[in-house]
Image (cartoon, rainbow, N blue to C red):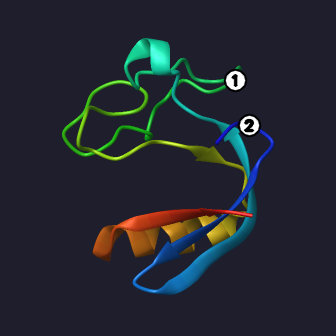
Amino acid sequence: MRPGDRVDILAAARVVARGAPVVAVPSPASGGQGVPPAGMDGIGSRSRGGGGFGGGIGDGALIVLSVPPGTAAALSGAAATSPLAVALR
């Protein structure tokens, strides 16, 4: 997965976001602690139990998406009760 790809995000067998563009992904060279894209400081993007941008091993991967506010709220709510899965389009 890389910036520019479009993904669907699923939670509990339902689609929460469809065709969301990927803005950034962690860098493999940084061990998952990727550098945030310009204009982002990583605040609010920490995985549970991990520090920095991208979280630690076992936390899952962090991807940054560009979605409307309503979709962001739906993603946040879904993530609170279910693991999220990514499907490439």
Q: Position of residue 59 (x, y in %)?
A: 27, 44
Dot 1: few (<14), some (14–19), or many (≥20) neighbours within 10 Å?
Answer: few
Q: Residue furthest top?
A: 29
Q: Quadrant of residue 1?
A: top right
Q: Position of residue 82 (x, y in %)?
A: 32, 74
- Reply above or below: 26 against 85: above
Q: Quadrant of residue 25?
A: top right
- Reply above or below: 38 against 10: above
Q: Residue furthest right?
A: 4
Residue occupying image coordinates x 70% and y 46%: 22
Three-letter residue code for mark 2: Pro
Secondary element at image label 1: loop
Q: Position of residue 65 (x, y in %)?
A: 66, 49
Secondary element at image label 2: loop
- Reply above or below: 67 against 40: below
Residue occupying image coordinates x 46% and y 42%: 62
Residue occupying image coordinates x 77% and y 48%: 5
Three-letter residue code for mark 1: Gly
Q: Earlier in the sequence, mark 2 or mark 1?
A: 2
- Reply above or below: 46 against 73: above
Q: Quadrant of residue 81?
A: bottom left
**Quadrant position of the C terminus in the picture:** bottom right
Q: Which residue is mark 2?
A: 3
Q: Which residue is mark 1?
A: 39
Q: Residue furthest left?
A: 49
8 or 88, which is in the foreground? Answer: 88
